[in-house]
Image: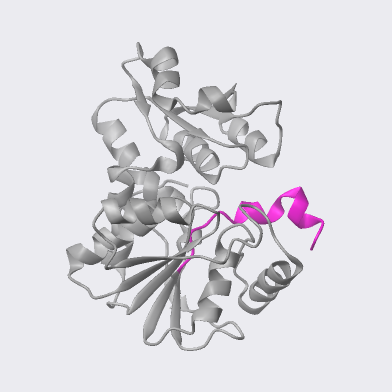
Amino acid sequence: MSIEFDNLHAPLQPLRIKGIEGDVYIQRDDLIHPLVSGNKWRKLQYHILYARQQGKTRLVTFGGAYSNHLLATAAAGAILGLQTTAFLRADEPIDNHYLRAARLFGMELIPVSRDDYRDKQGLYDAHFGHHAHAMFIAEGGAGEAAWEGVAGIVKSLPFAPDYILHASATATTAIGLGKGIQACGYKTRVYAVAVLNNVEEQRRLIQEAVLSEIVEVLEGYTFGGYAKTTDFLMDFVKSAIAQTGILFDPVYTGKALCALQDMALPGRGVFLHTGGSMGLFSEAFLRRM
């Protein structure tokens, strides 16, 4: 399956889940590709476009052991004929289904300590500074290229929604949506549901992007922290999947759905499915199914 900029299979459809009222649609970015899906592809696509334009042949990025971004980069690289390397944040040996899949797609994984991981530019320079065909991609694909890709979501919508709600870990998607709204001249509000305990950091990034009047970060939906869950959240996610046939996960989209239910927002809204459903099949969550 090829991934092309003008052929994204990401339909918009009504969202019908018990307890979520109002005129709500779901943007099915999870259908872009089984692994290179959601905001992972949106954030990668222009990095890859610029890499091709500059004659780069290797993508070098960063992430943790359960990073959807690493897996998406590995799969996209294999599909599009690019080599991939990732510096893996790991103080001890790690192996899981994410990393096995990344290796299957040919990704080179370089484990580094958490202390060394903090200096990402230094790691890149030490290993690839002499490599003219390598391209640095920030953790999670963050940066202006990512904003450009995410902004395309807004432009593709068939109407100007009153709000867009999504799961947020780094504010990159929120900023991209905000910039897309500005470009379209819409009055849409973005609700970024923080899924880990970094609300102030996300708000600072949004403020620096001069988007505070468009984007609001919602707190109170971490359910104990990043990749943590509760019986309530797991039951909610399982119910949502059974009602819709759409895979949601307890790390990102499930938490955002809980916020959507609680908010009961007026008007016509869009829930952005940011992909990452592979998190649902982590061993810790499978034991609670």
- Which residue does the image show at 58% across and 73% down from the upper left? 258
Give residue 286's position: percent from left, percent from top. 77, 56
Q: Residue at x 41, y 53 (%)?
A: 202
Left of 281 or right of it: where is 107? Answer: left
Q: Is 185 left or right of 207, judged from the image as shown?
A: left
| Total marks placed | 0
Residue drawn at 38 percent across, 57 percent down: 203
Residue 213: quadrant of the picture: bottom left
152 in relation to 98, above or below: below
Q: Could one spot residue 288 in this view of the protein? A: yes
Residue placed furthest toward the right: 287
Q: Name the quarter where the C terminus is drawn.
A: bottom right
The x and y percentages for residue 103 are 61, 30
* Residue at (32% x, 78% y) in the render: 161
Residue farthest to the top?
130
Compared to residue 203, the image places residue 79 above or below, namely above
Q: Is residue 163 left or right of residue 84?
A: left
Residue 265: percent from left, percent from top: 43, 83
Residue furthest front in the image: 200
Q: Which residues are magenta?
A: 272-289
Magenta stretch: includes residue 254 = no
In which quarter of the view is residue 57 placed? top left
In the rendered structure, does residue 274 fall within the stretch colored magenta? Answer: yes
Front residue (pair 162, 118) = 118
Residue 74 place in picture, x, y as percent: 51, 35
Q: Tell whether 215 sits left or right of 120.
A: left
Q: Which colouring convention does the figure follow? A: one colour
Q: Is residue 107 visible?
A: no
In the depicted structure, whether residue 110 falls above or below residue 67: above
- Seen in the picture, residue 16 relative to 281 is either above or below; the reply is below
